[in-house]
Amino acid sequence: MSITFEILKPVIDFVMSFISNLGYQGIFFLMVLESALIPIPSEIIMPFSGFLITNGKFEPISVVLAGTFGNVVGSILTYFLGIKFGRSFILKYGKYILFKKSHLEFTEELFQRYGDKIAFFCRLLPAIRTYISFPCGVGKTNFVKFTIYTFLGSLIWNTMLTYVGIQFGNNWKNIDKYSIYLDIVSICVIVAFAIWFVAKMRVRNNKVTEP
């Protein structure tokens, strides 16, 4: 048994029990927590739910939608936490997590200009997707666009993980061995966003320097 599995075993056991007992409501609630700064990996929640589809206990579309709407609700909660407490919290305690005032100001400007798109891309990134809604709130990203892109990004992510669980079947617990494929997808998303962002900034700088 791998070290990764040993570390995650208590979380896996909790997720299995919670979803098995509560069904779709369990998926929804866990995914709310996953998007509300509680590190319960969607990489466990959704593949296990996909595995239950192979047993005839769940239906694919319902699983994906339960997880996606859970993400949206959790993200909205975190978004408003960012609006209400984010700036003052970062200014007061940010130094303890190496987050400076200049970083905050850059984040606010970034999300004012590109927040909706960043919300979408970051929903496709492991780990980062759990926390991205907070800086979106701090940066006061347009709420409607934030919600739409959070939904779309979560829909894609949850569909992939559910499909992985269906394909793995009884071997879904071995997902840690195949996480490299998710990492490759994530890297591609980051590179695509970086190229888009740099191109956007160059266009903007060219317009500023034009006589």
Image (tube, grey):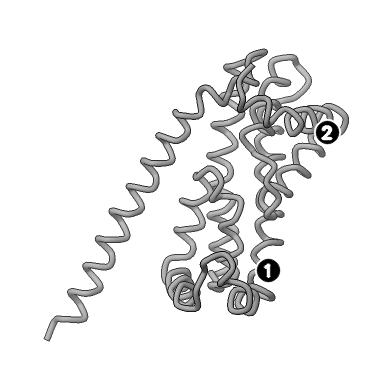
On screen, residue 87 versus residue 31, left or right, reads left
Give x and y (percent) for residue 200.
28, 64
Viewer-nearest residue: 56 or 96: 96
Residue 180 sits above or below residue 78 on the image? above
Which quadrant is home to the N terminus? Answer: top right
Query: Would you place residue 50 above or below residue 153 in this image?
Result: above
Q: Residue 97 appears at what percent x and percent y?
A: 57, 64
Q: Is residue 198 left or right of residue 46?
A: left
Where is residue 68 drawn, in percent x and y?
65, 44
- Note whether 168 is above or below 203 in the view shown: above
Q: Is residue 52 visible?
A: yes
- Farthest residue to the bottom: give it: 211
Residue drawn at 39 percent across, 41 percent down: 187
Q: Position of residue 202 (x, y in %)?
A: 22, 67
Q: Image quarter for residue 134?
A: bottom right
Q: Amino acid at mark 1?
A: Phe
Question: What residue does disc 2 label?
Answer: 18
Residues under labels 1 and 2: Cα distance?
27 Å
Element at badge 2?
helix
Total label count?
2
Label annotation for residue 80: 1
Residue 174 picture quarter: top right
Which quarter of the picture shows residue 64?
top right
